[in-house]
RNA sequence: GCCGGCGUAGCUUAGUCUGGUGGAGCACCCGGCUGUUAACCGGGCGGUCACCGGUUCAAAUCCGGUCGCCGGCGCCA
């Protein structure tokens, strides 16, 4: 008989044989009977080991094996309302594969301790459900891009182009030259649209910002797309369609994970196009009316984003930010003061999850803005070439995958949206 | 960079204000129990009170410094 997943064993009927393997999740013993709850990647199931029903050695091992020991179990299914899930296995064989030492993570846990023991905490139900949700998100994202004729591409993470609007970069020695860890794949994606037209990529991005908030990771997964022949308005349409597609599929197909994490599927089912669009200048007025001390030219902080999305069930777009507050590659609007950009702000205070824009095609304008940022123009020559050889209107956007997941999974801190978070003071384990 | 908080057993903590032999729960070990639900009952093991210095007859406790961590702001996705 083959091993089966706990999910499948739980579907079996009274009296059927079962054979599972996994890790001890909980254990209680009572003299001549041991209750062992086994965990595998699909769920948990209680196993009953009775002294009179198994080999002497098997009972002894079941009795002494500590939590997180790895085990193989054979037995018979019994329906019993006292068991979690309503079914349990009465063991005929109980084989310990790896005896666990005393597991450090117990009933009481602090944030710091769990981060120190992240490699073990990943086994928790909570982290497991979050990682499953993340995998599902990626699956639906791929589906959507595939159905909308985007090509997935694999740009480099090592780059010589340092600047993206003043955000701090990690630098390192590249055989005698200074190279950087990428903060965005955007410029490489722009190069690829001249053959593939619509491209997207998923890469790690690195920000050496000394940010210490629940919305920042030093290393995060950056989902970026770039589209030829697309202007800002259509760019927003693509974003809201993609985000809605992911939300609705998560709501329909990941109920178990959502329920465990406390996110109602209905919250995500309502996410559908179109999303509300607010121009920056109107957003400023709204914020002033709400009592914020903010004026034209100021960038939004977390409290501003939260206030703007207050009462919204769906994300909103804030468009047309002042030229000075955005990156050199964003196309300047006809008014000359703002750029053709849009930030997507998630509801419930989760903040900005997407930044996107139509791209500038005027080389002189870009050079002027780059110089203001103190960038070395010669590293951008290749990028200007893209405007010299058959330039087309084009747009793109970048989504912080962990921020998106934070909102979807209703997480309190972005560190839980990734298995090994890189934080300001922590890169171990 | 700025503001705030916390470091006591493997873990979670009481004790710090008001100085006088550091208590408990969990985990683990031993014993008991044939239906437990993060079981229960009895016993046991476990502490350089983050580190350095100062005050004092006496410091976990008061003072100064160092280190580590957490929360928030700013910046950003």
Image: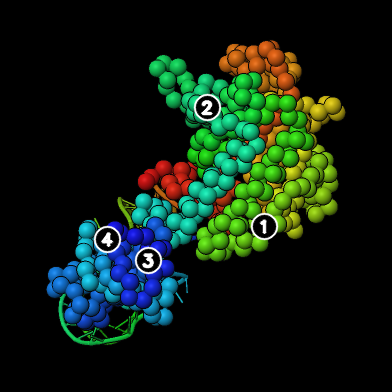
Closer-to-camera residue (B45/A310): A310
| Residue found farthest to the right | A335
Location of residue B30 (image quadrant): bottom left
Chain for numbered disc 1: A
Q: CA distance from mark 2 to mark 4?
A: 46 Å
Q: Which residue is mark 1?
A: A269
Q: Are marks 4 and 3 on the same chain?
A: yes
Q: CA distance from mark 1 to mark 2?
A: 33 Å
Sequence-earlier tag: 1 or 2: 2
Q: Is residue A177 left or right of residue A22?
A: right
Callout 2 and callout 4 share a chain? yes
Q: Within 10 angstroms of label 1, few (less than 14), some, or many (20 or more) residues?
A: some
Looking at the rendered structure, whether the residues under marks 1 and 2 are on a common chain is answered as yes
The lab-note entry on whether marks 4 and 1 share a chain reads yes
Closest to the camera, between mark 3 and mark 1, is: 3
- SS at circle 2: loop
**Left or right: A413 in relation to A335:** left
Residues A389 and A426: in front is A389
Say the numbered circle drawn on residue A9: 3
Work out whether A270 lies above or below B12: above
Co-location on one chain, circles 3 and 1: yes
Instruction: Residue A426: name its quadrant.
Output: top left
Q: Judge whether B49 appears above or below B76 on screen.
A: below
**SS at circle 1:** helix
Q: Residues within 10 Å of mark 3 (few under 14, many from 20)?
A: many
* Alpha carbon separation for disc pair 4 and 1: 42 Å
Q: Which residue is mark 4?
A: A1
What residue did someone put label 2 on?
A155
């Amino acid at each position: 008989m083959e091993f089966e997943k706990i999910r499948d064993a739980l579907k079996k009927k009274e009296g059927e044989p079962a054979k599972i393997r996994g890790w001890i999740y909980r254990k209680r013993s009572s003299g001549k009977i041991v209750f062992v709850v086994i965990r595998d990647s699909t769920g948990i199931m209680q196993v009953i080991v009775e002294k009179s029903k198994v080999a002497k050695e098997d009972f002894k091992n079941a009795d002494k094996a500590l939590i997180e020991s790895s085990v193989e179990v054979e037995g018979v299914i019994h329906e019993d309302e006292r068991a979690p899930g309503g079914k349990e296995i009465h063991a005929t064989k109980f084989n310990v594969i790896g005896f666990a030492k005393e597991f450090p993570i117990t009933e009481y846990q602090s944030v710091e301790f769990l981060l120190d023991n992240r490699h073990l905490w990943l086994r928790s139900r909570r982290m497991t459900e979050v990682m499953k949700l993340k995998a599902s998100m990626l699956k639906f994202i791929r589906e959507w891009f595939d159905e909308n004729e985007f090509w997935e591409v694999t740009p480099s993470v090592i780059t010589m182009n340092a600047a993206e609007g003043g955000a701090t970069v990690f630098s390192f020695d590249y055989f005698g030259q200074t190279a950087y860890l990428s903060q965005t794949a955007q410029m490489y994606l722009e190069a690829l649209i001249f053959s593939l037209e619509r491209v997207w990529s998923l890469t790690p991005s690195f920000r050496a910002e000394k940010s210490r908030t629940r919305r920042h990771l030093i290393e995060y997964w950056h989902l970026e797309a770039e589209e030829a022949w697309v202007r800002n308005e259509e760019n927003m349409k693509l974003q809201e369609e993609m985000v809605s597609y992911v939300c609705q599929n998560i709501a329909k197909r990941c109920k178990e994970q959502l329920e465990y994490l406390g996110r109602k599927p209905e919250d995500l089912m309502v996410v559908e196009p179109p999303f509300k669009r607010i121009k920056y200048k109107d957003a400023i007025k709204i914020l002033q009316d709400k009592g914020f001390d903010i004026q034209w030219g100021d960038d939004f902080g977390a409290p501003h984003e939260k206030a703007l999305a207050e009462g919204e069930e769906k994300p909103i777009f804030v468009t047309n930010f002042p030229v000075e507050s955005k990156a050199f590659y964003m196309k300047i609007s006809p008014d000359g003061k703002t750029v053709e950009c849009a930030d997507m702000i998630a509801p419930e205070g989760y903040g900005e999850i997407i930044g996107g824009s139509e791209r500038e095609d005027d080389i002189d304008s870009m050079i002027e803005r780059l110089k203001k940022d103190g960038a070395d123009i010669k590293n951008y020559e290749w990028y200007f070439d893209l405007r010299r050889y058959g330039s087309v209107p084009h747009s793109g956007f970048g989504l912080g995958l962990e921020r998106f997941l934070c909102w979807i999974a209703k997480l309190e801190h972005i560190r839980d949206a990734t298995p090994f978070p890189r934080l300001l003071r922590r890169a171990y384990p």
